[in-house]
Every structure is written in C-alpha cells, then in structure tokens.
Image: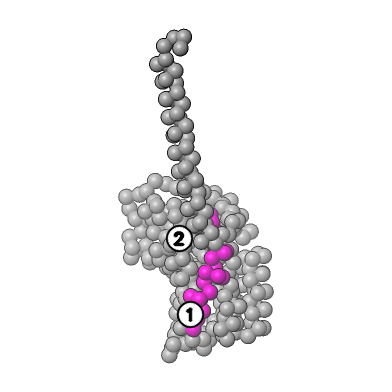
Amino acid sequence: MLVPMEPPETTRSAAFFDLDKTIIARSSTLAFSRPFYAGGLINRRTVLRSAYAQFMYLLGGADHDQMERMREYLSAMCTGWDVETVRAIVADTLHHIVEPMIYAEAVTLIEQHRAAGRDVVIVSSSGAEVVEPIGAMVGADKVIATRMVVADGKYTGEISEYAYGPHKATAIVALAAAEGYDLQESYGYSDSITDEPMLAAVGHPFAVNPDKALRRLAISRDWPVLDFSKPVALAERARFTEVRRPAVAATVVGAGLAAAGVLLYAARRRAKPAGS
C-alpha cells in the first residue's frame, strides 16, 4: 500500500488529483503538440517551442509567473482552432501519447480510493478536451479543468473557467458542496507549489514528485511526500495483473495440494502397524 488510508467514512469524501507530474509524467497539453502539428493546427516552430516548454517544465516545474506565461501562450496558440478537430485528434492519439506516461503508483492509488468508496476527481489547469478523456482512461469519476470560450465551433482564445492555483481550491469547495463531500475526510495530491490552496483545503494532503518550493512546504507542514517514478502503459499493467493473478492462484493451489499430501502421508504412517 502506498498511502496509509483512513478506514471508509460514513460521510462522502473524495480524492483530488492534479494531472501533470502527478498522474502522468509530463504536461498533458504540451504532449499533444506533435499530433496537433500533424493535424495542421500548429506549425513546426510552435512544436519546437512546445518541446522547449515541456523540457523546462520537467526540469523544474512551473511557478506562478511561468504558468501565467504558459496560459497566455496556449490561449493565443489555440485561438481559431476548430473544437471538434481538437477532440478528434486527442481521441485518435490519446492511447499512443498518454498511456505510456501514466504513473503506475497513481493508478494504484486511484484504485485504492475507489475501493474505499471515495470519488476520484482530476483537477487540472489543462483544457477539458484533453483532461476529460484522460480522466475516463484512468477511471476518474469527475474532472475539473480549464474551459475555453467557444463561438461558432471555434476557440475565441478567451478562458471561461481557469482551473489554476486558488481557482482549483474554489472549484473543489463548490464541488464538495454540490456532492456532499467532507473535505476534511478527503485527500489531495499535487506536484506544484501553485496547488497549495487545493492541498490546504483537504484533510489529507500529499505532495507528489514535488517541486522544491512544495517539498519545503510539505516538510514544514508535515505533509507526506510521495515519489512516483514508474510510468507504465495501462494495457501492459492490465496484462501483468492478469498474468500475476493465475500465477498467485496456482501457487496457492499448489501449496494447498502439497500440504494435503504431507498430511495424508503422515496419517498413513500413523495408521501402519508397528514393524510393517
């Protein structure tokens, strides 16, 4: 078990997960730059800029100013894009792009929370067109994501809902009120200091692969720190699970038969007449 969880509560609760570098190993939005290029939405220069932004994000995370610059850049980049084209590209390339970079530890945590009766909610500053399919892939119950203004089927470049920083905390408080979640009995997971408001809003906050600022804060507040390092394709993980289950079952059955054989042999030895 990765996380010492409290026993299931009588009230409803949830587990809130950031997406990038918490469930998946990269930026979900920037990961689609090549498929967007192949689909004619961006040019080669934009692909290179996205690759550089991805590298810098992986290297050191992103503070508030960097996130604001990224928001402005992405808003400008997607202005005029056809919404259905974006959704089609994401649907066609989702498993190829995203599946190999999902953390096995995150999937295990999601499964544990669902088994404990908690809703799993992904809370991400990436666009809903990217986050919602990923949420469905990993088994999330709900998604909170950034939503762009759409007119005549195209993005205007304006943002209607920005799921970032304190807005994440506001969104989960509103969702908790609507769904009846007890936030003090709920869990939160993120890698970034910009998500401090979200983590502070729940009773069980965890820093996952934290940037330096969040690691310092987690230590000062005695928040557990988790290090995820095993991206694994869901299909591969499922095959491993299915192979492992029969193997375990065979081991148990084999051990049972062996034990039964030992007992039968001992009984026969006791039943034999002396000297036979």
Point out which mark residue 250 bears: none
Query: What's the amino acid at mark 1?
Result: Ala
Q: Is residue 72 visible?
A: no
Residue at 40% x, 16% y: name it: 271
Residue at 47% x, 35% y: name it: 255
Pointer 1 residue? 88
Above or below: residue 1 compared with residue 210: above
Residue at 45% x, 60% y: name it: 16
How packed is label 1: few (under 14 Cα within 10 Å), some, or many (20 or more)?
Answer: few
Classify mark 2: helix, strand or loop.
strand
Q: Residue furthest top?
A: 275
Pointer 2 residue? 16
For the stretch drawn in magenta, the main secondary structure is helix
* Image x and y of residue 256, in percent: 44, 34
- The answer to whether residue 187 is magenta is no
Find the magenta span and give its range.
Answer: 85-106
* Image x and y of residue 216, in percent: 61, 55
Which of marks 1 and 2 precedes in the sequence?
Answer: 2
Label tally:
2
